[in-house]
Amino acid sequence: MNTRDKITRLADQLIRKQGYNAFSYKDLSEPMQVRNAAIHYHFPAKADVGIAVIDKAIREFDEYKQQWSDLPENEQLEQFAQMYMRNCKQGLICLMGSLAPDYLTLPEAMQMKVRAMGQDLLDWLTYCLEQGRKKGLFSFSGEAYDRALLVASTLLSALLLNRVLGEDTFQRMYDQLLSDLLKK
């Protein structure tokens, strides 16, 4: 892994643990045992770091979608939810959930990336839910897009609530979410 990738990976963890506005170049340089100038060499502005983190997350989600594409939609949804479960086990929240509170203070280029990341996620989730409903794998009322908003917000809030209320909070919310969608 090259230095740029190491910086991006560390920044991703810092954003997911404490938020974008809560870390500095020093928080990146000290654990890597390099000078701030080394960070600035790869990322002249902090927004460049943020954009790299978002781009990495988008690429990873694209890879996941490709891996899941041959699975039935209920299994795709379970795989999607498992991404959040992995974050939970690592004490991380999802990138969208971490960047949303800072959204109005983010540089415009980052805001655009966050919006694109969120829309991509919702577009995929909407399609998955609608196709699954057509095949009888899911049962829900209303528009698939509206249900996608509920699924995404439930998983995001489950990560946040788990931090405050304890280890089983995420699991309980996750189980209830899937149970509600899979009911016939």
Image: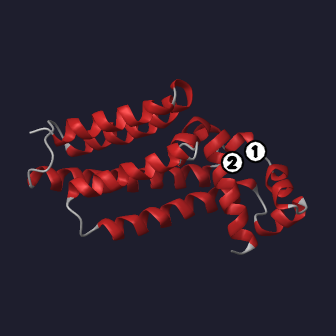
**Residue 118 x, y percent position in the rendering:** 44, 50
- Say the numbered circle drawn on residue 163: none
Q: Is residue 98 above or below residue 8?
A: above
Quadrant in the picture for the N terminus:
bottom right
- Say the numbered circle drawn on residue 23: 1
**Residue 45 x, y percent position in the rendering:** 76, 58
Residue 37: quadrant of the picture = bottom right
Amino acid identity at mark 1 = Phe
Q: Which scheme is used to colour this image of the protein?
A: secondary structure
Q: Residue at x 73, y 62 (%)?
A: 7
- Say the numbered circle drawn on residue 14: 2
Q: Residues within 10 Å of mark 1 (few under 14, many from 20)?
A: some
Q: Is residue 173 above or below residue 23?
A: above
**Horizontal side of residue 39 vs 158, given as left or right:** right
Q: Residue at x 22, y 53 (%)?
A: 74
**Residue 111 x, y percent position in the rendering:** 56, 49
Residue 23: quadrant of the picture = top right
**Residue located farthest toward the top when viewing the structure as drawn:** 165
Q: Give the camera-side residue of 180 and 103.
A: 180
Amino acid identity at mark 2 = Leu
**Horizontal side of residue 45 vs 60, given as left or right:** right
